[in-house]
Amino acid sequence: MGRHEQEMRVFYQAGTKSRYDLLQAQVNHEGLKPDLITAQNNLALANMKLATTIGIEKARQITASDDASKVSIPQSVEFDLEKLVEQSYRDRPEMRELKVTNEINAAQLKMAYAGYKPKVNLTASLGGSTLDNQTNLGTDWAGDMTKDWTLMMNVTGNFFDGFKTPSLVSQAKQTVEKAELDESYTRDTMRLDVQQAIQTIHGDVETITASKAQIDLSKENLRLTQSRFEAGMATTTDIMDAELALDKASNAYYQGVSAYLTALAQLDLSVGKDN
């Protein structure tokens, strides 16, 4: 719009445009300056947030480039859903945590069932010395067989413990069942995460492709509108409309690229990829 105002001033001085046209161009130019200031402030804040996120000095200058060659956007994308879901089941930390939890629950259930079983203790006596089942007999086991041997087995256990053991077993079973339900829900959630990430990527690629075509059309429309304006066949409003159409197409393109890259990162997160 600044360039357009300069052109309008030249036309006004040449007598081909009125003072009203010049004032309209000036008003439109000045009216866009607050948007520019807001965009500059937002960029400065984004730089500080990025510096905080990656742990560098906030005063460090960060430059952003819109070089399209640095971002490779495919024409179409294809994914093997089942393969990615299996990778998610294998590599997501939630599944590793559930696996450990299931092992702990199984051990606790086994311990609870042990309450039903008696305790058995075997004691052996040789020549007045006692050797129980926890002693390393070594070569003494084959000693003098003429001495007296005494073997004693002791069995202890609770005939009735006030239903404590059944209660512990029931509680352990419920814990195992809940863990199985949690695992099933987690698997469903992981599959949904992968499906959503894939769907988002497909949508972003389509948006980017459409935006590219719209940018080309908008650029050509702006060029033609400027030519018509120079020939006296278009107004300042026509120029603004053409500029606005190009801005919208450009914004849609860059937002699509940002969403696409974010969706790729989300897919990596969904399948447990850490590099």
Image (spheres, grey):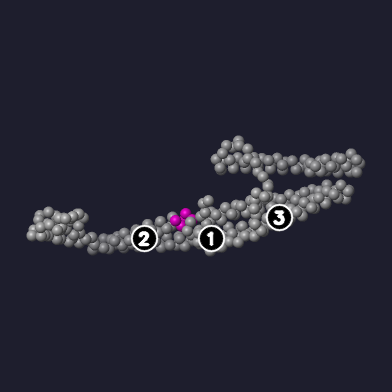
Three-letter code, disc 1: Leu
User: Looking at the rendered structure, which numbered label has been put on residue 211?
Assistant: 3
Q: Which residue is mark 1?
A: 84
Query: Residue visible at 77% across and 53% down?
Result: 218
Question: Can residue 177 be seen?
Answer: yes
Q: For the residues marked 3 and 1, what is the alpha-carbon distance in whole angstroms?
A: 29 Å
Foreground disc of the pair 2, 3: 3
Query: Residue visible at 69% across and 57% down?
Result: 209
Q: Are marks 3 and 1 in contact (CB under 8 Å)?
A: no
Query: Residue visible at 79% across and 48% down?
Result: 240
Q: State which tag comes first along the sequence, 2 or 3.
A: 2
User: Looking at the rendered structure, which numbered label has been put on residue 106?
Assistant: 2
Q: Are marks 2 and 1 in contact (CB under 8 Å)?
A: no
User: Looking at the rendered structure, which numbered label has been put on residue 253?
Assistant: none
Q: Which residues are magenta?
A: 92-96
Q: Is residue 231 magenta?
A: no
Q: Is residue 65 left or right of residue 124?
A: right
